[in-house]
Amino acid sequence: GQQVMQIPQYQHVQEGEDFTTYCNSSTTLSNIQWYKQRPGGHPVFLIQLVKSGEVKKQKRLTFQFGEAKKNSSLHITATQTTDVGTYFCAGPSTAGGTSYGKLTFGQGTILTVHP
Amino acid sequence: EAGVVQSPRYKIIEKKQPVAFWCNPISGHNTLYWYLQNLGQGPELLIRYENEEAVDDSQLPKDRFSAERLKGVDSTLKIQPAELGDSAVYLCASSRGTSGGQETQYFGPGTRLLVL
């Protein structure tokens, strides 16, 4: 079945350093979504990318969708302690080339920021 | 608008006991999802409802788990009997339409279940 994999699993940075997490799907995706989950919290939607090669920015966060629509990345510039949490990518589940109505989540990248 | 509401927030039970979780989605959202999240993992879908209809329950362990969404609004998820391995966070989410994987999903705070 479809797999969505994220690396790294953990990332520890000093405040002010940059951070990047990568997401790879075993199948082509119609779109990819990113969610953030604070410690003890629930996933909160960040952004959706739809087009091949698309790049979107939210303040210090830059999201990119690969040309083949099988990978994506999230880059945070100059991390702050408020960036702490787990970042998940998620893509529509597919089988036989058909996109089904549910999301498959990656296992997430846990970001810790040392002040 | 109000977010997805779940209750209880925490539940501790002994194994073999039943437990039920309740979810009230965002008003007007047609699709409701129940997810299981183990520590250090991403959410895994248990069941998805489009209005009253369960359209994807392939990951729901039907021998002990059941769910319902009467009138296409609130939903309950039940486990009977609970096992030690059921300890996890149970997340409810909703989305506006019925396009499933194409839509933004809004998550509730979750119910943290501990089975002793």
Image (cartoon, rainbow, N blue to C red):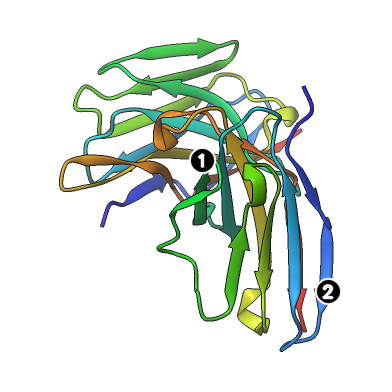
Query: Looking at the image, which is closer to me, A103 or A11?
Result: A103
Q: Chain of mark 1?
A: A
Badge 2 and badge 1 both on one subunit:
no
The type of residue carrying mark 1 is Phe
Quarter of the image for residue B66 reads bottom right
Asked if marks 2 and 1 touch (Cβ < 8 Å), the reply is: no
Residue B12 shows which numbered tag? 2
Who's the residue at 67% across and 80% down the image?
B80
Does the image show residue A39?
A: no
Q: CA distance from mark 2 to mark 1?
A: 28 Å
- The label on residue A109 is none
Q: Quadrant of residue B65?
A: bottom right
| Placement of the N terminus of chain B among the 4 image quadrants | top right
Residue located at (67% from left, 84% from top): B81
Q: Is residue B13 above or below residue A39?
A: below
Amino acid type, callout 2: Ile
Q: Is residue A14 left or right of residue B115?
A: left
Left or right? Give the position of A61 relative to B7.
Answer: left
Residue at the extreme left: A96
The residue identified by callout 1 is A88
Q: Give me the chain letter of mark 2.
A: B
